[in-house]
Image (cartoon, helix red, strand yellow):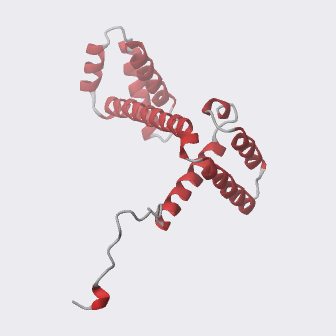
Amino acid sequence: MRPWDERPKQDEDEEDLGPSRSEQRRNALDMLKLANQLVELPPSRIPKLNLPEDIIDEIARTRKVTAHIARKRQLAYLAKMMRRHGDEAFTDARAALGEDRDRQRQEAAHMHRLEAARERLLDGGDAPLGELFDKHPELDRQHLRSLVRQARAEREANKPLHAFREIYRILKELEASQD
């Protein structure tokens, strides 16, 4: 073995040097991302997040800056202030932002389910309509059938999709009444 291949053994009582430089960069970028999310929140939500007072003031100042480079610099300064407070000061804010993200995903998934149901009604012929009427006998069959015919005609003629939207509203109300 060559002498330069040998690495000195570290003593067990040697102090930890802290996070690596790469880890510090990742943490700084995470804090910058959080700062940007906080600035984008509506002002009414900020007091509910249990943030330090100086951070709340700095968020308000950052919102006032509109020039691109100046805003970027101000966001970097806000992130630097946030890093000084440490991650523990922002656990409530991270949790609230995570809940918002989850709620938005659920709403988007709900909307996509309703849109898919509407597409099945328009593309599937009478079978999906029959299934819908079996599940919801209270529906006005004649009205819904006419809306489906009208939506198909609107789509083929490239006209505004009024019946298309009305079917979506009906499906949304049905799902809301089930909950």
Q: Position of residue 53 (x, y in %)?
A: 71, 38
Foreground residue, 46 or 163? 46
Foreground residue, 61 or 132? 61
Foreground residue, 49 or 155? 49
Left or right placement of residue 24 versus residue 178 in this view: right
Left or right placement of residue 178 versus residue 60 in this view: left
Name the image quarter holding the N terminus.
Answer: bottom left
Left or right placement of residue 25 versus residue 123 in this view: right
Outermost residue on the bottom side: it is: 2
22 over 91 or under it: above or below: below
Q: Position of residue 66 (x, y in %)?
A: 76, 53
Foreground residue, 68 or 110? 68
Q: Position of residue 28 (x, y in %)?
A: 56, 58
Q: How many marks?
A: 0
Left or right placement of residue 40 versus residue 141 in this view: right
Q: Residue at x 28, y 83 (%)?
A: 6
Outermost residue on the left side: it is: 1
Q: Residue at x 41, y 22 (%)?
A: 171
Q: Position of residue 74 (x, y in %)?
A: 72, 56
Name the image quarter holding the C terminus.
Answer: top left
Q: Residue at x 40, y 17 (%)?
A: 174
Question: Within the image, what quadrant is residue 168 found in?
Answer: top left
51 over 141 or under it: above or below: below
150 over 80 or under it: above or below: above
Question: Within the image, what quadrant is residue 56 found in?
Answer: top right
